[in-house]
Amino acid sequence: MGAMSLHWASVIIIAPSLLAADFARLAEDLRRAEDAGADWHHVDVMDGHFVPNITIGPPVVAAIHEVVTKPLDVHLMIEDPWKYAPEFLDAGAAGVTFHIELEDRGDTRALLRDIRSRGARAGLAINPDGDVKRLAPYLDELDMVLVMSVFPGFGGQKFIPGVLEGVRALRTSFGFEGDIQMDGGIGPSTIEACAEAGCNVFVAGTAIYGAGDLAERIALLRGSAEKASARA
Ligand code: DX5
Ligand code: ZN
């Protein structure tokens, strides 16, 4: 194992994105992902304002919370996380991540603290064109940084390799030791570079739910990430 991996969360987490599941058979698909080895369920919440797409809200999260055994990792792509994060926590979110791009719309630090005070994990996400320096003042309030490797809004987009630089900076320049999650276009051909850069949590929608054999695909992703992070 490389020296750097001693300094960061080295447990690899594979989080299938519910966005690529069959919305008419959510319970069935989420259980299928759990049986196949998923660690978390990544739940993409979009409001049609922060991103040009609308997905699901707290009632759906509460309903799926009843049928899953793995943590619900809720990624809020909404304009007002201050208003709605509490509802997602009530619905059973194990972690709530919102976007640094909204920093000036409310008290970011206060919301991160509220999420943690509810016993949940707090995360901040950054878009692919964002500068990770913006996250620096909040790093000690964060369980996780989510680095978007596509512009948020839709599944099935192409991975943007330029974001790896920000991941490396978080680990080396800023010494961030929490989880770093990569989200967007993650699959067998992109996961290794992310793990080598310092990511340990991987969201994959299309690459997991679109695979014929979910267990085989999750094992392949996990194996590749483990090997690459050991090389880092
Ligand atoms: C994009 C979402 C992602 C997306 C990933 O706005 O945040 O979680 O579902 O989907 P894939 O893995 O298909 O790129
Ligand atoms: Zn997401």
Image (spheres, helix red, strand yellow):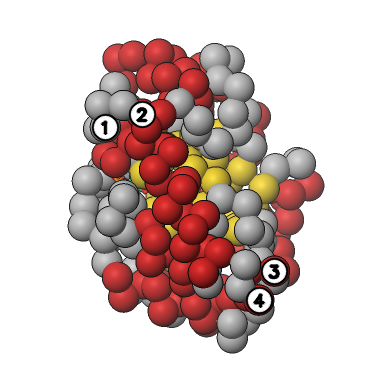
> Ligand 1 closer than 8 Å to the CB at disc 2?
no
Q: CA distance from mark 1 to mark 2?
A: 6 Å
Residue at mark 2: 214
Q: Are marks 1 and 2 in contact (CB under 8 Å)?
A: yes
Residue at mark 4: 3
Q: For mark 3, give the secondary structure.
A: helix
Residue at mark 3: 6
Q: For mark 4, give the secondary structure.
A: helix
Is residue 132 visible to the viewer in this orientation of the structure? no
Which residue is most to the bottom?
173
> Residue at 29% across / 41% down in the picture?
207
Q: Quadrant of the N terminus?
A: bottom right
- Label 2 neighbourhood size at 10 Å, few (<14), some (14-19), many (20+)? many
Of label 3 and label 1, which has the lower sequence position?
3
Numbered badge on residue 211: 1
Q: Amino acid at mark 1?
A: Ala
Quadrant in the picture for residue 73: top right
Q: CA distance from mark 3 to mark 1?
A: 33 Å
Q: Nearer the viewer, residue 106 or 232?
A: 232
